Image (cartoon, rainbow, N blue to C red):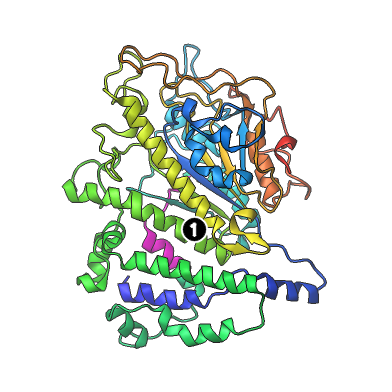
Amino acid sequence: MKRRLFLRGIGGAALATPYLSSFHDKAARAAGTVATPPQRLVVFFTHNGCLTNRWFPAKEDGPITADDLAGTYLEVLTPLADKLLIPRGFRSMNQYSLSSSGQGIDPHDQAMGSKLTCATISTARERYATAESLDHTIARQINNTGVDPLVLGVGAASSSIKEVLSFSAPETAFPANVNPQTVYNALSGALSSGGGGEPGNEAGYLVERGKSVIDLVEDDLASYQRLDMSKADQDRISDWLDLLRETEIGVNNPELAAACTRNAAMNYGVTDETVEAASPTGAVTGSVFAPGGGGAEGDANLAISFTTGGDMMMNLMALNMICDTNRMLMLVYPGYVKFGWDGITHGHDHHGLSHRTGDLSVGGACKVAGVLDMLRDIDIWYTSKYLRLVNLLESIGEGDGRLLDNTATMWLPELSDGNAHNLNNLPIVIAGSAGGYLKQGAIVNVEGRQIGVGASEDSCANGGSIGNTGSFNGNVPINKLYVTLMNAVGCTGPDGGEVREFGVFDGTTITPGITNPGEVPELKA
């Protein structure tokens, strides 16, 4: 796709109406109804667990205070503490075994395939999930016309079970879209009403001169803003245009162009064919699933994708939410990459570091000097990205509040501790209440007994052997959290009432069936 054609769509996007409560309320009153913004679920997903003793607050139940977050990774979220929910005690109930002698299944394959399906994984080579995942179940109910969820990622494209979280049907992977330009192209196509004619028109001329396409519709926007609307809606239009312009600037950014389309910008002299050939698919290297081949340039593209590209994906998620083209969104970060950006320079990939060995081996001696410091680097970096996403949604007005208020923005990990590979005691935080459904400003112990924070730093602190870094408590089926979230965003059960069950099983064996149905009342406002 030509750069000027891509950017031309931003002009149409600028005229797309965000959710304006004053106009919507008038229409709703005329129809005798009460207007409410849509509810949404956003999943921010990361691999390989974390140093749980640094992630969790010591408090396990009660209101969140600044003192509770102090000294933890979540301390940076303190200004938004009253909009946080930290549920303690959930377990992904998928750590089953097909062998009487032990696990018998790769824990990463299992954690990914079962995470959002609560089902077994196939014994076929792909090891894909044997059921549809939560995001598709939700999207089918709450998205307009039932469109697929928006599943985005960074880095190299992958259909490996170790990287795929979403499944549109049994044994049908739904890999994340890792190309910001493609994502925005789809969005601008939905917003545009024709797109401006042939190359050489005013829009194309402005782009070629390096000017903003938003300026092309300046008069129309001014007329629109003169309409009778509330001050809050005027602010929302300003928020909308600011975000659009930031997105447009990002697309014009030469570093991002290199990461997303490999010199896609027309002013860099790249043709349609070159843009397509240099897209992130196959052009980003430096991970287990895209090793070598690209040299220093390919590794640099990985860094840009993780930083500028990932930030752009967040902007595009917000745009999709503002224009209500998707209410079920996920951002998935890959777990088999070597961090080399934002001041972090590691000699081993994240997965190997989480084992404390730097490679695929488990147990034995701590082979990597300073491994805990490296894991802290990664954990803090991911926390900063979750903070950015939450702050972005909090910055955009909607209804009588903010976009965040009508959304449940959940940080969901693959594992608890990457060395123990445990799936209990999951470090989960949710920002936003999904329209007032979820409790906020609280830590909620859903298990009802002391859980603890794990022992992630007990081994390797001073070299030596790798010990058990997991935790034994925190075993409430995660199915119940998913049921709660489904009800929060407006899903219904088969009988038209509230959702009572999700998944194929909720135990630690492969015996099918839900033994503990229903949501978690303690998580509700």
Query: Image check: 400 left or right of 394?
Result: right
Which quadrant would the N terminus be assigned to in this image? bottom left
Query: Image check: 241 left or right of 5?
Result: right
Q: Secondary structure at mark 1?
A: helix
Q: Residue at x 26, y 65 (%)?
A: 275
Q: Residue at x 49, y 58 (%)?
A: 317
Amino acid beneath label 1: Met
Q: Residue at x 29, y 34 (%)?
A: 349
Query: Is residue 123 among what the camera can see?
Result: no
- Residue ID for mark 1: 317
Relative vertical location of residue 143 with respect to residue 335 in this rendering, above or below: below
Q: Quadrant of residue 378?
A: top left
Relative vertical location of residue 104 with respect to residue 20 in this rendering, above or below: above
Query: Is residue 83 among what the camera can see?
Result: yes
Rendered location of residue 316, percent (x, y): 46, 61
Rendered location of residue 364, percent (x, y): 32, 13
Magenta stretch?
173-187
Please tell me whether residue 92 belongs to the stretch shown in magenta: no
Rendered location of residue 129, percent (x, y): 50, 37
Please tell me whether residue 175 belongs to the stretch shown in magenta: yes
Q: Nearer the viewer, residue 408 or 277?
A: 408
Q: Residue at x 41, y 23 (%)?
A: 419
Rendered location of residue 101, percent (x, y): 47, 11
Q: Nearer the viewer, residue 460 or 34?
A: 460
Q: Nearer the viewer, residue 86 or 298?
A: 86
Relative vertical location of residue 430 with respect to residue 25 in this rendering, above or below: above
